[in-house]
Image (tube, rainbow, N blue to C red):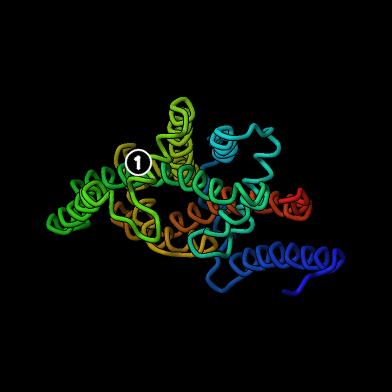
Amino acid sequence: MITLSRKAKHFLTVVVKLLIVSGAFYFIYSRLAGDNSPDWIKLKDLFNGSTSFILSAFIITLTFLNRFLEIIKWRNLVSSFKEIKLRESAAQVLAAMTAALFTPNGIGEYAAKALYFEKTQTKNIVFLNLVCNGIQLIIAVFAGLTGLAVFNTYYGILPAGYLLILLAIVFVVIVLLFTARNFTLKGYSVQKIVNKVNAIPKQIHRKNILLAFARYFCLIHQHYFLFLLFGIHEPYPEMIAAITAVYFLGSSLPTFQLFDFAVRGSVAVLFFGKMGINEWVVVFAATLQWLLNIVIPVSIGSYFVFRFKTNTTPR
């Protein structure tokens, strides 16, 4: 086995850090400067000047809350085996976001967080990250299906048969998970996962669910306020139904986190177009939300990536 010297390991660590951060910012730049980027000059014409300051304040507050709640959520889950400080949780969450930016479905987040802990805790950290993201996914699925059903009653975007098939698929998957919970694949089964989930203290679960709902509320209403900022005043129930449906369908497609805005943006144009909303407003709202929720945290996370030091504790 080839053994690297300490200097070689340090050099490789620096190179990896530079590649991660450089890659993240290159992809961000290519999105903002590409041929398909929004025409920012049109932004002035879309703002509703009379209420723009108050709405902007709401949007920025929700941006901060969204990420802050995620940091608290991760700290809460890690407390199941170790107490960490709020700044440690912030470093882990934001650095993991940066590492996950150009990996399929953000899987780099799992590896990045695991690097902050002992090697013996790697499986536990991956599992806790699954729990962290899993509850957000469950909320997004059920809220999205409800929103899709409500939106469909107003605009008939999907034939009733297709919607029933979609609901049937979700129902069948849930039934299969319960009926085949003892089926084992490479030592893993649904029942083992359920047992491991149940091993986490209930107070941690309750807090995790509450924080997940709060995060989802912030994200959905941030998008809603962005539309208000651009002078769109469609009925609240219809807008929320459309937004939750867009998030559900956009998140269901395999993609890189970097291009998440493009996938959701294209779905959003379809849905909000049915409501008669100008597609430029839809594109601007999707792009601004991407800037607020991805670009800014990744920029901060880059700092933590550079400051990261490999765990030198004997294993």
Image height of 216 relative to 9, above or below: above
Can residue 52 be seen here?
no
Neighbor class of circle 1 (other Cα within 10 Å; few <14, some 14-19, many 20+) is: many
Regarding mark 1 in the picture, which secondary structure is present there?
A: helix
At x 66%, y 53%, the residue is 115
- Left-right relation of 39 to 208: right
* Quarter residue 76 falls in: top right
| Residue most extreme to the front | 1
Q: How many marks?
A: 1
Residue furthest top as drawn: 203
Q: Position of residue 84 (x, y in %)?
A: 67, 34
Q: Amino acid at mark 1?
A: Ile
Horizontal side of 77 relative to 90 (left or right) equals left
Q: Residue at x 36, y 44 (%)?
A: 138
Instruction: Look at mark 1 in the image and give the residue it sits on.
Output: 240
Quadrant location, the N terminus? bottom right
Visible residue check, residue 27: yes
Residue lying furthest left: 161
* Residue nearer the viewer, 156 or 315: 315
Question: Residue at (56%, 39%) from the top-left corner?
Answer: 74
Q: Nearer the viewer, residue 171 or 126?
A: 126
Locate residue 273, reporting x and y percent: 33, 57
Q: Compared with residue 209, is residue 131 higher up or lower down, i.e. above or below?
A: below
Is 122 on the left or on the right of 10, as rendered?
left
Give the residue at x 69% y 64%: 20
**Whole-percent x, y for residue 181 in the image:** 28, 49
Find residue 286 and report its horizontal and vertical position in percent: 48, 54
